[in-house]
Amino acid sequence: MKSLKDFEEDIYKCSRCALCQSVCPIYKVTLNECCVSKGKFNMLNGIIKGELAMTRQAKKYLDLCTQCNACKNFCPSGIDARKIFIAAKNEYYKKNSQPILLRFANSYKVFKTILFLSRIFFAIYRIFKLDKIVNILRPLILKTGILGKRLILLNSLASKNIKKSKKNKKNKQNSKKAIYFKGCFNQYINNDTELAVKDLLNATGVDFIEKDFECCGISYLHDGDIENFKKLAQTNIKKLDTDADYIITDCASCFDVLKNYEEYIETKLAKDIAKKVITPVELISQTNFKSKKHLRITLHKPCHENFDIAEFIKNVENIEYIQAQDYDKCCGFSGKFALQNQEISREISRRKAQQFIKTGADIILTTCPACILGLEQGLAETGEQNVPAVMNLFVFLAQYCTTR
């Protein structure tokens, strides 16, 4: 893994052209040049030269980033700002001792405990059908302000569309073995997507191998806490048997992290794993889907999604695909960023949601649970009553479509 010093040439290579400002979702909301790559590079250049210290304030500026990597894709020099910021934040953790309370909050045991309690909470929430009640009372709840909007957001996590996996007969010809990386959302919050993926791949000759994985570690990685990230990565890598044909994950963020394990765990096994990680779309891309009823569909493409899901959706029969402006730009909900910078996150999401409302679509599809939260957050922030439903692509295919 590279240190901040190793990126000195890349930082120096930045021409300060400010093109990153035109694509940075945070800059568009704040107009603060310290939020964009060129501003942070000025600061990091001073830190590398010893003119500035890697303080908590410096890390706060580095944390003003959704990790969308839009600046890299638009940079004439092709500088990967995300990797540089991660290395810089890791430098902060190396040089600064953390308060006991912060170390406790960042503990993986605490994180797992919260997930476990969340599983119990949402199970009880659904038993009492609170998700259905909140959906009915949505117009009134939105009028209660920020607390009501947060309840709508929580309710989007709880709502279930698929009750059980279908019992389709498997196609045993050319059977493939696939390790299924569920991700925290499927495992602890709502397993709709898991059930949908299994339904969709049931007849394709794919045998699922399930293992008890830990979190992919995305939160620790983006925070620059590489020590804790590597612990999770190493634990997961040991369970990712490369004798399988595929390693499947339905979460765009998990996909991106699993692919990048090899950059932080420099072993042959990690490299072999990176080659086998795929999304379910790659296995069903040749399947012909038909919507049971005519629907107007639009798409939010997650920042970490590398498959052309727009083209895939366009091929679904009996739907009208409407591409929203900036459909592939950040939704504003990026793990800790949304917690640490709530106002900025909400405004990014609101602006994004307005573009989707303009399409007049019935459903917004995406492939990332965090993006579903971002979209729901944005729709709630608009205050509009008639808004599109937000749905995972695989849940939509399993619930609304048939195969031909």
Image (cartoon, grey):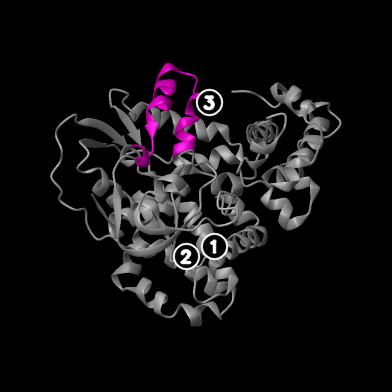
Q: Nearer the viewer, mark 3 or mark 2?
A: 2
Q: Is residue 148 above or below residue 48?
A: below
Circle 2 crowding by C-alpha within 10 Å: few under 14, some 14–19, many from 20: many
Q: Residue furthest right?
A: 51
Q: Is residue 264 above or below residue 144?
A: above
Q: Say whether residue 53 is visible.
A: no
Task: Name the image quarter holding the N terminus.
Answer: top right
Indicate the position of residue 329 as horizontal and vertical percent values.
59, 50
Circle 3 crowding by C-alpha within 10 Å: few under 14, some 14–19, many from 20: some
**Residue contact between numbered discs 3 and 2, judged by CB atoms under 8 Å:** no
Q: Which residue is mark 2?
A: 361
Give left or right: position of 170 versus 381. left
Q: Which mark is residue 173?
A: none
Label 1 to label 3, Cα distance in Å? 37 Å
Q: Nearer the viewer, mark 1 or mark 3?
A: 1
**340 or 165, which is in the foreground?**
165
Indicate the position of residue 89 as horizontal and vertical percent values.
66, 36
Mark 3 belongs to which amino acid? Tyr
Indicate the position of residue 221 as horizontal and vertical percent values.
55, 37
Q: Residue furthest top?
A: 268
Mark 2 belongs to which amino acid? Ala
Q: Which residue is mark 3?
A: 264
Secondary structure beneath dot 3 equals helix
Give left or right: position of 25 versus 175. right
Label 3 to label 2, Cα distance in Å? 41 Å
**98 or 206, which is in the foreground?**
206
Q: Which residue is mark 1?
A: 356
**Residue contact between numbered discs 1 and 2, judged by CB atoms under 8 Å:** yes
The segment highlighted magenta reads 255-282
